[in-house]
Image: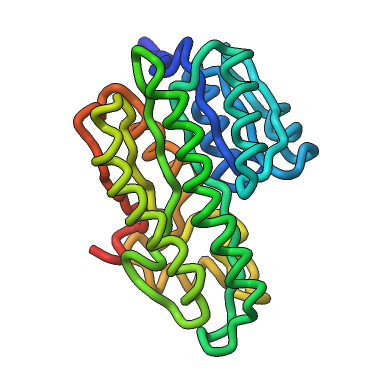
Amino acid sequence: MTTQTATPRTRFSGRTALVTGAGSGLGRAIALAFAAEGANVVLAGRTEATLKETAELVDGPGEVLVVPADVTSSADLAALIAAAVERFGSLDVAVNNAGILRAGQPAADLPEEDWRTMLDINVTGVLLALQAEVRQMRTQPGGGAIVNIGSTLGAHTSKPGTSAYGATKAAVSALSRAAAVEHIRDGVRINTVSPGSSDTSMSFQPGETEAGRAARIKETNPLGRVAKTEEVAAAVLYLAAEESGAVVGMDLVIDGGSHA
């Protein structure tokens, strides 16, 4: 019997992919997936140490650039894009993944600081990043693709204690759809991926163990498990790839059938 070896995919060979919030969780998985398919990867986030940890995990033919940046700072984002273009010559893909969850309080009891922090990072941060990315991409002959990371919370469902977070993620979905229509003629394609429960720290309830989460999800999710971070990353790569060239303004839900 002849054993067949899978041929490595190289959809992003020679292209540059930027990922914000790349120091952990979904951002790390997305960055590693782009690198595995040949991209030069720009890792952005507030904590340089965790970005360097992600860089150490990269396994691919492309190069890696670590750029600490705060997505709430337009100056940081301008410097981030400039560093990416200076190093690699273009910005072909951007994934705006940086986000924060502060949950547990009903809307009436939510601390104002928590609301403003989530709004600043989850919404304003996405807008500022998207602005900087589009400004660069529309100057390029090949344009570019942007994927914003939303959530099933907000635009697709709601849960007690997550009203503010859901509001910010619903805003990401609405912003992405409108921006997609506004900038497709600039050669910039914008879409959203909205994960449900995935294998990150955000999917745990307070004090919950991994076994407890598994038991809860088995009873409440049609798939019976959380999504793997690699599965969410695969959806992001699809929306960033040339094969999805006609997909504009999509909000792709990855939730194991919870909202089917």
Image point (31%, 32%), residue name: 189
Of 19 and 167, which appears nearest the observer?
167
**In the drawing, does residue 225 fall left or right of residue 111?**
left
Colour basis: rainbow
Residue 156: image quadrant is bottom left
Residue farthest right in this picture: 49
Residue 141: image quadrant is top left
120 up-or-down from 45: above or below: below
Image point (51%, 19%), residue name: 16
**In the drawing, does residue 23 fall left or right of residue 166?**
right
Number of numbered discs: 0
Q: Is residue 9 visible?
A: no
205 up-or-down from 16: above or below: below
**In the drawing, does residue 241 fall left or right of residue 163?**
left
Residue 62 location, x and y as percent?
58, 14
Residue 22 location, x and y as percent?
62, 39
Image point (61%, 70%), residue name: 102
Of 230 and 184, which appears nearest the observer?
184
Q: Quadrant of the C terminus?
A: bottom left
Residue 66 location, x and y as percent?
70, 28
Q: Is residue 185 visible?
A: yes
217 up-or-down from 231: above or below: below
Of 239 and 114, which appears nearest the observer?
114
Residue farthest bottom in this picture: 108
Image point (44%, 61%), residue name: 169
Q: Quadrant of the N terminus?
A: top left
Residue 68: image quadrant is top right
